[in-house]
Image (cartoon, grey):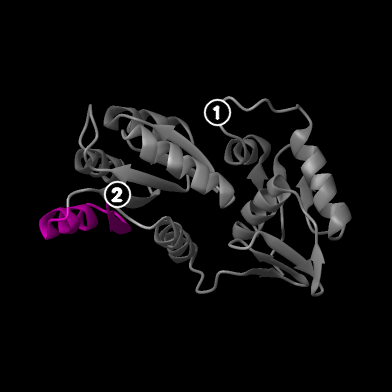
Amino acid sequence: MRILIAEDDQSLGRGLVTALEREGFVPEWVRRGDEVLPVLRGETFALLVLDLGLPGLDGLAVLQQLRAEHHEVGVLILTARAETTDKISGLNLGADDYLTKPFDIDEFLARLHAIQRRREGRAESLLNHGAVTLNPHAHTVTHNGTPVALSRREIQLLQLLLEKRGRVLRRADLEQQLYRWGDEVESNALEVHIHHLRKKLYPQLVRTVRGVGYTIDKP
């Protein structure tokens, strides 16, 4: 899942990028508030981690403009402001959750996962599809109860397809969700990952919609 971090603290920003990559997310990082909206208008992100005290444009102003444009990205506010009024303002403007600095990184990750589940209408963490079960937290996949060794990128791709079962995902959208800015991507990388998923799990798992993209059909 692709996440945009808007945080001007260099040390914290680097720490969040590292933690999110380790958790299997695909993070991008901007340092100014006035950079957030142009990025979100041009690219797709599932979640936004938004500091309130940003240079260029305050985080609450970013959030207000974001929701005024009917942008549906999930938002977790991070801030050193502990006042209840700031929390209420953020939530009323459309934030999904609020975390006050300093915070525990495990709580941060747990809140992101909770936002993700709520937005997808899932009560459980596990993603099940027939005999296939994916645990996004543990980064494990089983088929008929037997562990299957998948690469990090293969797990990310499988999660994207399982979360959007029944929808055809375009190649360009999948690549955008799987790779960070500046990553060198081979032209056939996505097809290779799809091939591995079919080989390691079962051939009919991922269906190709010619000229459009890929999908996992609903049971």
Tell me which corner region of the image, top left, top right, bottom left or bottom right, holds residue 38: top left
Dot 1: what SS? loop
Dot 2: what SS? strand
**Where 86 falls versus 183 (above or below)?**
below
Tell me which corner region of the image, top left, top right, bottom left or bottom right, holds residue 26: top right
Q: Position of residue 21 (x, y in %)?
A: 56, 45
Residue at (29%, 56%) from the top-left corner? Answer: 99
Magenta residues, start to end: 82-101
**Where 29 falls versus 110 (above or below)?**
above
Image quarter in which the C terminus is found: bottom right
Q: Amino acid at mark 1?
A: Trp
Residue at (60%, 39%) from the top-left corner? Answer: 173
Residue 150 lies left or right of residue 121; in this view the side is: right
Q: Which mark is residue 78?
A: 2
Task: Report how far apart the C-alphas of labels 2 and 1 lie in the structure.
Answer: 23 Å
**Do we see residue 149 in this rendering?**
yes
Residue that label 1 marks: 181
Q: Nearer the viewer, residue 219 or 39?
A: 39
Tell me which corner region of the image, top left, top right, bottom left or bottom right, holds residue 191: top right
Local crowd at mark 1 within 10 Å, few (<14), some, or many (≥20)? few
Q: Position of residue 90 (x, y in %)?
A: 21, 53
Residue at (13%, 60%) from the top-left corner? Answer: 84
Q: Amino acid at mark 2?
A: Leu
Residue at (67%, 70%) from the top-left corner? Answer: 128
Is 40 one of the magenta-colored residues?
no
Residue 144 lies left or right of residue 171; in this view the side is: right
